[in-house]
Each structure stands twice: as C-alpha cells, then as structure tokens.
Image (cartoon, grey):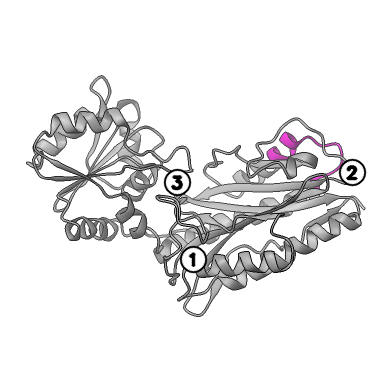
C-alpha cells in the first residue's frame, strides 16, 4: 500500500501554529510530535527543534541517528551521546539566534506513560542555556493541531484496522479451551505480523488477553499463563501498526453457552456500544455525545457496569488526548471540543460485572460530513465458541 504523506505541508502547518502563538522555536520532546515531524520510528529520547521560520532538526541518540536519517524524510538528524540531549538542543537554538526569544516546550502530564513531556531537569537545562528566553508550554496547541487527521492518515488507519480485524478472525478460528492467554496473544501477534504490522505498539501488554476474572478487573490485561476455562469471557484486545498509524480493536468471546446473568451483561454491552457509535456525529461536542451515552447507561440501570467512552489515537506515540468524556481534565480531556470531519477516536468502553464477566469494546471511528464511520468490520456481539 503506497501512501504519500506531504511532510513539508505538515511542518508548515505546525510552524503556522507557532507563529500565531508568537513562539519563535519549539523544542518538542513528546513521542507523538517526534513521529509527526520525522515520519519514521524513533523510540529513543529525542527532541525536534522546530523554528517558526526555517528548517527542522531532530536530535536522537547517536547509535540510531543514521537509521532515522535514512528512513525518515528530514535532512538534519543530529546525534547526541556524551553531551546531554538538552545541551545539544540549547546549542541548536543558539545557532538559530533564538536563545533569547520565545521558546515553546511540551509540558504537562498524560495518563499515557510514554508520552515524553519535558522533564524537570531538561527544563532547568533549557533555562540555564537560554537565560534570556521566555519558555512557554505549547502542549495544548500541538494536541489541537493533531485532532483532525490528514486523509492519508485515515487511509493508513484503515489498513492498520484491517490487520487487527484479520487477527480477530484468526482468534475466532483458533481460540479453544485450555489455551493460555500468552498463547492466544501469540496467535494474534503472528497474524498481525503476517499481514504487515510493524510493531506491537501498546505499553499495556502488546496483544492484551484477559479471561475469566481477568476480564472484569481493569482496563489493562497483559496476557498471563492462565488457562482459558469453559464458561469464561475472554477479552481479545489486539494492536498493530501500519505506516506508523496505530490499529486498536478490542473484541470478546465466551467459551460455551452464556448463562442468564452473562446474557444480561452481553445485552447491556451490545446496546450501549450501538448507541455510542450512533452518538458520534459532526457538530456535537465531545461532552454532549459522552453525556448522552452516560445518560443512556444510567437510564437503563447499567451505570455501575459501564465505564469510559473513548480515547484518542493516531500515529506512533499514541495520541491519547482527548479522552471521550463529559468531564474536563487538563491535558487529558476537553468536553468542549467540537466533532469535525476527519476527527479520529477510539470509541471504547468496558462492561464489567464482577463474578459474572467483563467485556471490552474498542474501535477506531472517524467523523464524516454527515455522521461517523467505524473503520473496523469486527462485529459488536461477542463470539460464542466451543458450543
């Protein structure tokens, strides 16, 4: 699949945001921002030096700088090793003549652990190296720039999602009683790699598999050596990456005929997922849509079982912002964001009833001109396997 990303246009859009904010140069450290500007896989602590006018430079560890230069599109990939990264960044800013101007950084926090915000010591090094500068936090500006995806990103996400769907189909055909969760995860990972996935990207356990009591204990189920038993729900949460875009499809199975209590959980889950997908449409705010979904669960008496309605997604680095909720949390969610075409989100929820079972839904959904489109073909209804 050949997709051309216009990185020069992408950089111009970022520089335009900086100019409008009166920022002369950005020293970006977050993983998603590094990916955004380089167009390649950069797993090491790195920094992008983005002047409001001029050429972008990226600093990364010396042992990997040649590969990053060869596989990305930028011409200036600078290695660092014995000299700390931020000292090298200060030198770059000084060479641009901007060490006493307005410098943007990515500060704040995230629920997502590998976010990459500037550290306290890096901030101090930047202050010491640029004593006349005004250092400002531009995290919110960059987050909002990335909310609306390029058409090329949507195309790559379709492919990443199709690979996840293929892994789900493979699991439907192979999951059986007595398998361990790690074995099931390996089946999914093998299928994803066979279909072209570049990376098992999630920090929550690669391919997440949770059976029995582990299906209702949380939103993170790294696979264990637990064996799947008859009558258990199994969460099948698979992740792939294609063209640096992150596919994420969580589905569910039950081993054997569900009990009456399990049927009630399934019914609540299916109805809420269906309603949630219908609630996403252009012109609505995230808070309005999330509030409507929350009301739906409460009106049906499911408020104690169902949690969460979505999180951001994008390219390597995982654009977690914004969480899809009607509650404002700095750096995590903003209910006032208006849904627009090409806004991409993982619509997600858990439906957990301890002692009975748990189900997890995750699907990439893109807002269109008239509504929304779920990019995954995997059905909502859990699979009943093993008779």
Q: Residues within 10 Å of mark 3 (few under 14, many from 20)?
A: many
Please tell me which residue is depicted at 87% across the width and 41% down the height of the picture.
177
Foreground: disc 2 or disc 3:
2
Please tell me which residue is depicted at 61% across the width and 73% down the height of the picture.
278
Alpha-carbon distance for marks 2 and 3? Answer: 37 Å
Place of residue 260 in the rendered image (x, y in percent of width and height, measured from the top left): 90, 58
Q: Which residue is mark 3?
A: 316
Query: Over which residues does the magenta segment extend?
Result: 174-186
Place of residue 126 in the rendered image (x, y in percent of width and height, measured from the top left): 20, 33
Q: Which mark is residue 230?
A: 2
Which badge, 2 or 3, is on the more N-terminal residue?
2
Question: In terms of depth relative to the viewer, which is nearer, 378 or 197?
Answer: 378
Alpha-carbon distance for marks 2 and 1? Answer: 39 Å
Cβ–Cβ under 8 Å for marks 1 and 3: no
Q: Which mark is residue 286?
A: 1
Element type where label 3 sits in the image: loop
Element type where label 2 sits in the image: loop
Foreground: disc 2 or disc 1:
1
Q: Which mark is residue 193?
A: none
Alpha-carbon distance for marks 1 and 3? Answer: 24 Å
Q: Residues within 10 Å of mark 1 (few under 14, many from 20)?
A: many
Element type where label 1 sits in the image: helix
- Residue 271 in which image quadrant: bottom right
């Amino acid at each position: 699949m050949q997709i051309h990303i216009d990185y020069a246009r992408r950089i111009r859009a970022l520089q335009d945001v900086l100019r409008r904010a009166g920022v002369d140069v950005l020293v970006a450290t977050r993983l998603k921002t590094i990916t955004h500007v380089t167009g390649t896989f950069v797993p090491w602590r790195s920094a992008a030096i983005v002047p409001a006018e001029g050429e972008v430079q990226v600093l990364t560890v010396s042992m990997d700088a040649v590969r990053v230069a060869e596989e990305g599109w930028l011409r200036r990939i600078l290695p660092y090793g014995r000299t700390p990264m931020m000292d090298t960044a200060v030198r770059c800013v000084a060479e641009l003549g901007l060490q006493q101007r307005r410098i943007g950084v990515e500060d704040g926090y995230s629920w997502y652990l590998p976010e990459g915000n500037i550290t306290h010591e890096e901030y101090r090094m930047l202050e010491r190296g640029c004593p006349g500068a005004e250092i400002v936090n531009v995290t919110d500006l960059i987050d909002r720039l990335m909310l609306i995806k390029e058409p090329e990103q949507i195309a790559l996400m379709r492919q990443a999602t199709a690979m996840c769907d293929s892994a789900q189909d493979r699991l439907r055909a192979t999951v059986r009683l007595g398998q361990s969760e790690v074995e099931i995860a390996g089946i999914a990972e093998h299928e994803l790699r066979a279909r072209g996935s570049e990376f098992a990207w999630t920090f929550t356990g690669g391919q997440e598999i949770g059976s029995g009591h582990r299906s209702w204990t949380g939103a993170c189920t790294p696979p264990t050596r637990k064996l799947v038993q008859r009558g258990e729900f199994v969460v099948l949460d698979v992740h792939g990456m294609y063209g640096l875009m992150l596919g994420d499809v969580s589905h569910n199975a039950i081993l054997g005929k569900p009990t009456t209590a399990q049927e009630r959980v399934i019914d609540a889950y299916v109805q809420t997922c269906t309603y949630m997908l219908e609630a996403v449409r252009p012109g609505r705010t995230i808070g309005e849509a999330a509030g409507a979904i929350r009301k739906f669960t409460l009106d049906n008496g499911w408020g104690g079982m169902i949690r969460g309605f979505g999180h951001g997604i994008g390219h390597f680095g995982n654009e977690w912002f914004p969480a899809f909720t009607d509650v404002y949390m700095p750096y995590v969610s903003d209910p006032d964001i208006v849904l627009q075409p090409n806004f991409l989100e993982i619509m997600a929820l858990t439906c957990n009833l301890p002692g009975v079972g748990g189900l997890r839904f995750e699907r990439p959904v893109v807002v269109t001109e008239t509504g929304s489109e779920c990019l995954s073909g995997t059905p909502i209804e859990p699979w009943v396997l093993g008779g």
